[in-house]
Image (tube, rainbow, N blue to C red):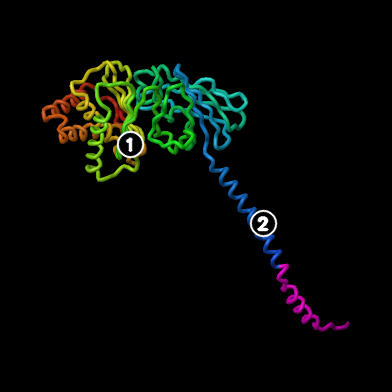
Amino acid sequence: MKTFHAKAQSRKDNRQETSTYISPLRFSLRLCVFARNFFFVLLFIRVVAVHASTPARVVISIDAAGQAKVEAELASPSRSWSFLNAYAGALGFAERVKDFRAMNGADVKKIASGEYRSEGDFTRISYTVVLSQPTPAEVPHVSWIVAGRGVLMFADLLPRDFKTFSVEFKLPPGWTVESSLPSDKIGHYEVLDPEKTVVVVGNTLHRETNTKLDLVVSGAWPFKDDKALDAATQVLKHYAALTAFTLPYKPLIAIVPFALAGSKWKAETRGATIVLLIDPTVHFDTWIGQLKVIFTHEVLHLWVPNSLHLEGDYDWFFEGFTLYVALRTALELKVINFRGFLETLAGAYDAYLSHPDDVSLIDASEAR
């Protein structure tokens, strides 16, 4: 047997050394290829990321009869859609959703009130919401359109899985949109929190503004808009000093006429928007004084509970707390006297005694 000495090892080493040598031209070509491939990888990642982060797009068309036609392009395919059906004691308003369809008229089944299912996945849906017949129990907690004006709340207009989206409004001639949200140059609004976003629409809206607050008034009233804005701003500044917390947004107050049965006014403070519905047939001796009393309660809701991170039903706490602090504020701002303060407290206490104490705190917290 012959023994082969490992003389070739030196040749192997030489081969390794020569193989690691790359001419400047070849190095430049390889670098260009790498840069090109790396660029396309980055481009692909960017395209995928942009596509994945594209929000849903919504078009809401309002007609004078009080119907809202909703056309939505979803951010991702879905085969189930669920609408809010209960809020603040109002029940069953998801039945206002009609003619729910998926893309190309695909079959969608209604399996329960406000619940829709399809056999396939779709990215486009359309439906109609009848807003012309709100009940006294629903107002002012849900969307409605009556007599050339209305309030739109995305919490009940869109399915619950809509988290962020861009919305465009198509309105009857002469109607305008007012919201605490800014719009872009073509009238689109970016909605980041639909459960807390409110939009006012109508044909007689006028806006008053300062650095602290926006006021939107629908129709004609026995008070001047700037005086109402001044009253609300005084209350807003008081609560900012009381809480030592500055709101991270500019609030909007909307005063809208609505015929109310058995009540002079009702209000809803949601997110950055206060909607105050006043029966246009009522008379107040001093309108600005009455508005300021209302503001002491509703403006405080911008802090309690809207600025608190609470989970669950805390109406039993924040309504009673707000009532008391609002009365104290009205007294301090000299909107009411001490006798009026005591009479209001007595009235609230009598109302409490008039209700039977036969439900648990948890059950009672589900209704205001």
Q: Foreground: 219 or 299?
A: 219
Label 2: state its secondary structure.
helix
Q: Can you give x and y, in whole percent of width and height, for residue 92 in the image?
A: 42, 21
> Which residues fall within the magenta stretch?
1-26
Q: What residue is drawn where x is 39% and y is 17%?
A: 147
Q: Does the magenta stretch include residue 46?
A: no
Q: Reply above or below: 293 against 136.
A: below
The local crowd at label 2, few if under 14, some if 14 to 19, many if 20 or more residues have their Cα within 10 Å, is: few
Find residue 260 and report its image quarter.
Answer: top left
Return the residue at label 2: 37
Mark 2 touches mark 1? (CB < 8 Å): no
Q: Can residue 164 be seen in this view?
A: yes
Q: Can you give x and y, in whole percent of width and height, for residue 176 in the image?
A: 42, 26
Please indicate whether residue 121 sits to the left or right of residue 260 in the image: right
The circle drawn on residue 251 is 1
Q: Can residue 362 be seen in this view?
A: no
Q: What residue is drawn where x is 57% and y is 43%?
A: 51
User: The residue under label 1 is which amino acid type?
Assistant: Pro
| Quadrant of the image containing the C terminus | top left
Q: Is residue 4 magenta?
A: yes
Q: Reply above or below: 277 against 324.
A: above
Find residue 227 and report its image quarter.
Answer: top left
Please indicate whether residue 230 sits to the left or right of residue 37 in the image: left
Q: Reply above or below: 368 against 44.
A: above
User: The residue under label 2 is which amino acid type?
Assistant: Asn
Find residue 225 and report its image quarter.
Answer: top left
| Outermost residue to the left | 339
